[in-house]
Amino acid sequence: MRSLLVAFTLIVVAITAPMMAAQKVELSIDASKTGAKIDRNIFGQFAEHLGHGIYEGIWVGPDSKIPNTRGIRNDVVGALKAINVPNVRWPGGCFADEYHWRKSIGPQRAVTLNPNWGGVTEANAFGTHEFMDFIDQIGAEGYVSVNVGSGTPQEAADWLEYMTAAAPTTLVKERAANGHPTPYKVALLGIGNESWDCGGNMTPDYYVSQMKIYSRFVRNFNPEQQDKHQMLKIAVGPGGDGPRWTDWTEIVMKAYQQHTWSWDINGLSMHNYTVGHWPPSYTSVGFGETEYSQILKFTLEMDGLIRKHSAIMDKYDPDKKVALIVDEWGGWYAPLPGSNPGFLVQQNSLRDAILAALNLNIFARHADRVRGANIAQMINVLQAMIITDKEKMVLTPTYYVFKMYVPFQDATFVPVTLDAGWYTHGDVALPRVDAIAAKDAKGKLWLEITNLDPNQPVEIEASLAGITAKSVTGETLTAPKVDSVNTFDAADTVIPRPISAKVQGGKLTLKLEPKSVTVVSVEQ
Ligand code: AHR
């Protein structure tokens, strides 16, 4: 009986083995056919006063034993510098519409409440100067969201004068007395956050009248931002799919079309999390292929949403002057057991790495309209780059994807043609392979390929036109399981490793592991 069973098992293995053989996938890339610039701002970050995103994640204070520069963690700064963060959106999120900037400047800081997130107190130790110091240390620009919900245009106008003016006004003298005589730069200005919900539950028409007032009076006075490098004003945009959101985009964009000399907007924000269903119930770790495939299916809805809202924007702004800025995106899962549910603490797995790559590829394909995006959130919150616990720090799989994509910042999009068929699991069908290509400033070709299939490797054969390819090098990110994570004790489970690839006769060949993200560059 036992030998019969063994024989039967061997037959089953023999039958199923070919199923695991690598799928051959042909790609074609013509490097002479280029598209829009992939704005480096699509690799932006979001840091809200929420849980341990700011306090402990960035700010430990100058007296901390954790190595820091003026209170800002050195390990976190070092890690963020390596991913070339273009901009950081701050101070929220919902927090922004309850934030009053004066409470967090100067030697005496008010202790206030953070009713949105965990009902904790807000020390206001991290304010304007600390934020500006932080982005300066990591080499990023500031995307500051002003309080439209519970603030006033005057409060926001004063804040911008405080930050950006050079003339010796009372506010500028106060800034100098607080340690910064020269004006700060504010690259992007968010006019409210989710004003349709936590930002004040406004109707689109009411928001539009607020938006015009803030756009008119909240000025940037930095002398270096008057002609070149002008501050971009980002209006609140849609928060999902359905008529409520298409109506919102219609009304804001229609107003934009009729704008006069006295006000303007340069961007429309869009928020779209990969959550499945509210409240978030998918777990961030300890899941299998079913949850893996479902979450990836949800995340690919980003493409349809961008198309829908871009089409509305095209009606009112055919020249694409207003950028679509996806300034909150990422996986939002059930809070980790034992954590404060208001702190939005979750793990970050190989699935998140793949999710990040798919979204970045979607943004790149829409580079003519999507010229900014901010993953939520940078440290210790939602789909974070970095997780800290006191003096410990670990870099997540999502961090490594951002690192691998650095060459795509400001590179020129190059279309890729492929038909890799489908990966199916249960009732979910996903494109087996996703890919983008781009040329950097030096003309070097970069190719990203994601193998979504968690079971089968893929053999890529890419025909390259428009360049004479000589050699290829690259890295791939994968791990044993779809829910593999990096921990403080095992920080190298999901990290990029070198991949070998060949070019011969204008063809690039390489083998992709199941559930992997790969970036290669082609030398000519
Ligand atoms: O990122 C967490 C929250 O999600 C933000 O504060 C809010 O804008 C969104 O609803």
Image: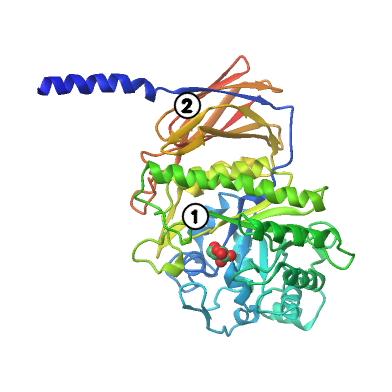
Comparing 445 with 184, the one in front is 445
Residue positioned 49% across, 48% down in the render: 398
Mark 2–mark 1 CB contact (< 8 Å): no
Give the residue type at disc 1. Val
- Ligand 1 quarter of the rendering: bottom right
**Viewer-nearest of discs 2 and 1:** 1
**Disc 2, ligand 1: is the CB inside 8 Å?**
no
Snapshot quadrant of residue 184:
bottom right
Left or right side of 134 for 210: right
| The disc label shown at residue 458, or none | 2
Residue at the front extreme of this rendering: 243
Q: Quadrant of the C terminus?
A: top right
Residue positioned 43% across, 62% down in the render: 345
| The disc label shown at residue 340, or none | none
Residue 440 drawn above or below residue 103: above
Disc 2 crowd, CA 10 A, few/some/many (<14, 14-19, 20+) = many
Residue 342 image offset from top left, x and y in percent? 45, 69
Residue positioned 69% across, 81% down in the render: 177
**Disc 1, ligand 1: is the CB inside 8 Å?**
no
Residue 176 image offset from top left, x and y in percent? 71, 77
Dot 1: element: loop
Q: Name the residue under label 1.
A: 275
Residue positioned 77% across, 83% down in the render: 170
Residue 293 image offset from top left, x and y in percent? 44, 42
Left or right side of 171 for 56: left
Sequence-wise, which precedes: disc 2 or disc 1?
A: 1
Give the residue type at disc 2. Val
Comparing 333 with 493, the one in front is 333
Q: Which colour scheme is used?
A: rainbow
Q: In which quarter of the image is the N terminus?
A: top left
Dot 2: element: strand
